[in-house]
Amino acid sequence: MRADSIVPAMETGKTQGLAIVDKLLQQFLEVASCKNLSQAAKRLYLSQPTLTHNMKRLEASLGLELFTRSASGITLTESGELLHEQARIMQRIYEQTLHKLEFIRQRSERGLRIGAGHAWWHPLLRPVLQQYRQQHAAASLNVDLGNHLRLLDMLLNGDIDLFVGHEIHGLTSKAGLLFVPLFLSHDEVFVRAGHPLLGRPCHHSDLLDYPSLLVTPDENRYLHLVDDLQPKKQQRSLLQLNEKIIYTSNSIMVSIDLIRDTNAVMPYPRAMARFFYEFGIQPVTMVERYNQGVVGVYLPRETADDPHVTQLLTLIRDQVNRLGERITTF
């Protein structure tokens, strides 16, 4: 052990913490551990005469003998035993203090507040945030899942830093946001096991005889964020949502229960197919692609160069590449 190795370094970049335990006490602890000046000197990277001189200085400063020297080595006197015990306590307190200070420093590291549609949590964001936490263990993370217009409102109000979701057509030009496209996706139409629509090709018209289940539908209080509502009206018209029974829920687990308990059809991104399969929920074989669109990340323009944001975007892109056709439409 080097003479300065007993003084832990609290790193803030390249900055080291100040030594609290006196250097002579550090050397004393090593001598007390080895019970041999020659061995202690080697471990401290000091010459034996230097270490012997320093121990005599320590004894002189205290006015006490700390060692009993003999041909077989050294032993601690009663005073030496007391100093050894107290110095070790001081060392532990110092090291614990540095660890706590380092934790406080890391905790102050910038956290991230992330939003996403439910569809993008399990296959995409969950593994991404596991990697992010490994690199920023003390950084705080907040994840908010839900409707993309509600998340957009949170982003504009500064309640989240970014969110992952479908590109919002007709978005007001006043938003001043950056959309980073990631991949093209489309919805499957999911139903319970044994549903009458399974086992044959289906058209949009085949869905009209069954209730529709909408997960996290748009809320009227957020529609002011969209200047052009025509795309949303066209989607409702395609499913004839104004003319049929509709179930809605903001919970993915409640939606799963509703699908399993009824003959409802649930349009939802294909990325969730494996997750739904675990609950006996299957996609219908649709002849036409349903609700195809671009999925990406919305964020304020001024944060686009933030190191934490750019790192997260890189991790998200890597995960998209790993998922391949499980998540993307080709």
Image: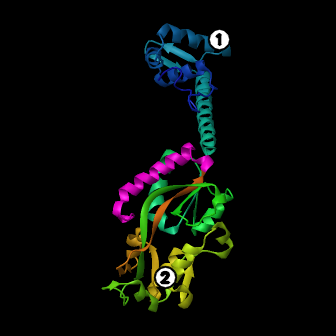
- Foreground mark, 2 or 1, reads 2
* Element carrying mark 1: helix
Residue 41's spot in the image, x, y percent? 47, 15
Going by the picture, which residue comes out furthest to the left?
Answer: 199
State how far apart marks 2 and 1 are (Cα). 94 Å
Left or right of residue 238: residue 138: right
Q: Which type of secondary structure does the marked residue at label 2 adopt?
A: helix
Q: Magenta stretch containing residue 300, yes or no?
A: no
Q: Up-down: is 104 above or below 23?
A: below
Where is residue 265, by image quadrant? bottom left
The answer to whether residue 328 is left or right of residue 180 is left
Q: Crowding at label 2, few (<14), some or many (≥20) Cα neighbours within 10 Å?
A: few
User: Which numbered circle lies on residue 129?
Assistant: none
Q: Is residue 316 magenta?
A: yes
Q: Nearer the viewer, residue 183 or 151?
A: 183
Residue ID for mark 2: 238
**Residue 261 rendering spot, x and y as whole percentages:** 46, 88
- Give amino acid for label 1: Ala
The one nearer the camera, 292 or 88, is 292
What residue is shown at x 46% (from left), y 67% (from top)?
Answer: 293
Marker count (numbered): 2
Q: Amino acid at mark 2?
A: Leu
* Residue of label 1: 60
Q: Is residue 71 above or below residue 144?
A: above
Q: Main secondary structure of the magenta part?
A: helix
Provide the residue span drawn in magenta.
301-330
Q: Is residue 252 above or below residue 98?
A: below
Colouring = rainbow
Position of residue 283 in the picture relative to residue 48 (left or right): left
Sequence-earlier tag: 2 or 1:
1
